[in-house]
Image (cartoon, rainbow, N blue to C red):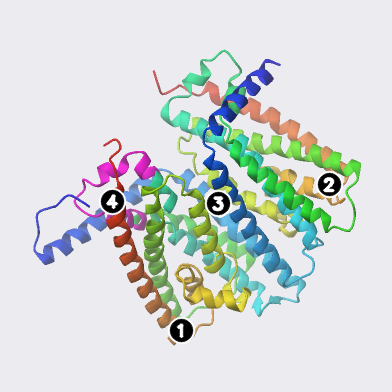
Amino acid sequence: MNAVRVGWLYLKIGVLNELQYRVNFFVQLLQSLIQIGTGLVMLSLVYSHTDELHGWKQPELLSLLGVQVLLGGVIHAFIQPNMERLMQDVQEGTLDYALTKPADSQVLVSVRTVRIWQVVEIVSGFILLFVGLAGVDKSVGFVDAIAFGCALVIGAVLVYCFWLIMTTGAFWIVRMEHVLELFEGIYRTGQWPIGVYPGWLRYSVTFLVPVAFAVTVPAQAVTSRLQWQTLLISFVFGCVLFVVARWFWRFGLRHYAGASA
Amino acid sequence: MSVDAARLPEAGRWRSLFDFYVTTMRTAVAAQLQYRVAQYFYMIGMVAEPVVYLVVWTTIAEEQGGAVNGITVGEFAAYYIVWTLVRNMNIVFGAPFWEFRIREGRLAGDLLKPMTMLHYDLAYFAGWKFVVVAMWIPIAIGLSAVFHPTLDPTALQIGVFICAIWGAYLIRTMFQGIVGMLNFWTTRGAAVFDLYMATEMLLSGRLVPLQLMPGWVQTLADFLPFKWTFGYPIESLVGDMSTRSLLLGLVAQLLWIGIGLAGYRLAWKFAIKRFTAVGG
């Protein structure tokens, strides 16, 4: 409970801090429009040569793109800034300031920074999702919507765990900033249905970097393709990865000697 | 702007410049070899982009009977595998890093050096190429084993390709530098950089081979620098270009290097007047 209170407090401070820079809203808006525009161009190029991509029609793939942009917004607003700061703190020796505070260190390093204007990306993702769903033959039922919400939350937790595990590596490998490029590159795979990829890549982006669980599974839910077993596996995998991430964080901390003082 | 150094005889100046490039490149190789894991993270992330495109277009080609607009599955594989090498060669001091350079006060120190900064950026990133290309080889072998590219270049194509990837490097350095100098006027250039990158992605052949783009896009691409940094170098090796087209491509690259250099110098002339030292 204390962790939730600490998280909420940091979130409020982070939001207030970001709200001072209102021009960033317009910068973010432009960036989101550019990102979506590029995605739409690629979609239209693909569908100018085919009617279906591995069984996915254009509106369904537009929904998938919406989920990818939406979750990307969550990552860029809440997860990535904290992990970048953690890497920087390890490099500069300022992590001690967080570790010496009387609260759970994992919670602290995960909630200190928020880039609230990235919410524009989340809204853009929702718009794309709704536009896509408007073109899908089947309507989204109540159960589909609930499954979508659950899958999205599990997806966000999975991505957080992946980021935390990778960032904890900074305790051993100081220059971890390229993990950002690694994740951004692999996250692009979520723009397309997981089924198009060859087996080795499909398993890699499902279990090594959980993009498939994070993006494809929620998109399957709203397009009525999701089987409940997949959601269950996703939930179990999320729990397991959370425990592993927590253990790895504590293991990393035990090997961290600090660089300041 | 840079600190005036004592003038050397013309031959000595060129010799010194050559020595400077060799030394800086060797320094870059030594420095980058220290961070091999970081390099591989960067490269795997980078390689993911063409692999996604390759898989998507391969799927479409297979659904269409083996080819899209005349490009076969093997040709797509060759295009995107060569893409990964060209992309590595295209790593330059990017536009967003100019903000870092100014904000962190690095520029103040750089201005005290006896040569213009362009030389330092060019030499350092040129040295880095040797590391990334060496690390790229196993990745390329792996991709080739998985995707079976159709690649049978002539000696002329290989020669032109080697020149073209360095031409692409120079063009991209100049134009990224011009856009990066926007940071002398505003620290909120991120949206402009993104717009530039999106334009490059669509008009360079980075997203898809330009043959798959509508005709008007291909025509537009002919008159902009982007195509000469991605599409042309790749096509020079994997495409079916005539000798004349290959050589004319190199001439076009020279032209864009000239335009880029002139633009860079002009932008620098105005930008440096805006600079107020930070740190130092």
Q: Where in the figure is residue B111, as x and y percent of width and height?
A: 24, 47
Image marks 1 and 2: residues in contact by CB distance under 8 Å: no
Badge 2: residue crowd in 10 Å (few <14, some 14–19, many ≥20): many
State whether residue B210 is above or below residue A135. below
State whether residue A7 is above or below residue A32. above
Amino acid at pointer 4: Ile
The residue stretch that appears in magenta: B100-126
Q: Dot 4 corresponds to which residue?
A: B272
**Same-chain status of marks 2 and 3:** no
From the viewer's perspective, tell me whether residue B207 is left or right of residue B254.
right
Amino acid at pointer 2: Ala
Q: Measure the C-alpha gap from mark 4 to mark 2.
A: 54 Å
Q: Where in the figure is residue B145, as x and y percent of width and height?
A: 61, 64
Badge 4: residue crowd in 10 Å (few <14, some 14–19, many ≥20): few
Amino acid at pointer 1: Ser
Q: Name the mark nearer the viewer: 1 or 4.
A: 4
Q: Dot 1 corresponds to which residue?
A: B245
Q: Name the mark nearer the viewer: 3 or 4.
A: 4
